Amino acid sequence: MNGGASVLDAAFAALADPTRRAILSTLAQGDATVSELAAPFAMSLPAVSKHLKVLEASGLISRTRSAQFRPCHLERAVLDEVDDWIQEHRKVWDERLDKLDEHLKNLQRGEEGRDGK
Amino acid sequence: MNGGASVLDAAFAALADPTRRAILSTLAQGDATVSELAAPFAMSLPAVSKHLKVLEASGLISRTRSAQFRPCHLERAVLDEVDDWIQEHRKVWDERLDKLDEHLKNLQRGEEGRDGK
DNA sequence: TAGTTAATTAACCAAACGGTAAAGTAGGCA
DNA sequence: TGCCTACTTTACCGTTTGGTTAATTAACTA
């Protein structure tokens, strides 16, 4: 039921940092170089470089070379996987809440019985 | 443009751990106690307890008391916020890719000019 | 060739993380 | 009252994370 979660590990971990999310937001408006991405932050270049390495390792971005620049580029696939996980769980969640709602309407009180294994 | 990101910080960080995602999956099928949630894992009770504390702090779950049990319960709101962030970025992403596509069709070559600030 | 710009790598540090074992707390139950 | 059950809290430990500065690599430019 669970085929390869390490992508999600890295993706969620990458998304957990506000600096990295801001970088992704910037990048959503177009490719950018490391210096350009670093500009808005009160943070050294190497720090941003590390964030980009994390993002690249997660697969959320890719980097190419253009002379001495390393333009960064967003990649959709991993964000799609993250979205898939969330949608899947929201679905089950919803169904479950519907059932619970129905259940409550039927019982109208706490029978205490979670459906044991 | 960015009002309060700390919820996302905590939520993404919480989701970054596979054990915690598994706990959420279990919980999606119904509320459960700490011991029940811990059962599938080769991990001590305190470890699971910590994970639950992280999940609770992120707002992804809530916990009540029922005698000596602490049944855990999924909360939708935060997952919805996470979903919102992702949808927002997928949207911009898509628009941008569409524009790029169009742009490429118009130019058919690398004019090298990123639209500078 | 020497110098400048762009970015990464290396070494280091403090704080956070994920786990442990052991002790403490709180609520049934005999 | 005293014990069992269900959990949490408290050290403690090794690893990872996010940042720093300094040194290095790579490519353009004079």
Image (cartoon, coloured by chain):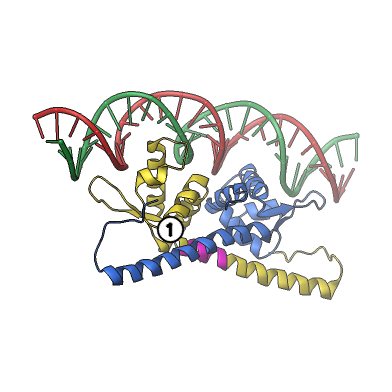
Chain colours: A blue, B yellow, C green, D red
Question: Chain letter of disc 1?
Answer: B
In this view, the residue in front, A51 or B19, is: B19
Q: Residue B51's quadrant in the figure?
A: top left
Indicate whether residue B9 is drawn in magenta: no
Query: x and y percent of residue D27 in the render?
Result: 85, 47
Type of the residue with mark 1: Gln
Residue at the image position 58 percent from the left and 58 percent from the top:
A82
Question: What secondary structure characterizes most of the magenta part?
Answer: helix
Q: Which residue is mark 1?
A: B29
Query: x and y percent of residue B76 in the render?
Result: 42, 63
In this view, the residue in front, A19 or A87, is: A87
Callout 1 crowding tier (Cα within 10 Å): few <14, some 14–19, many ≥20: some
Query: x and y percent of residue A104 in the render?
Result: 30, 68
Residue at the image position 61 percent from the left and 66 percent from the top:
B90
In this view, the residue in front, B116 or B68, is: B68
Chain part drawn in magenta: B80-87
Residue at the image position 37 percent from the left and 51 percent from the top:
B56
Q: Secondary structure at mark 1?
A: loop
Indicate whether residue B86 is drawn in magenta: yes
Q: Is residue B17 visible?
A: no
Residue at the image position 65 percent from the left and 48 percent from the top:
A52
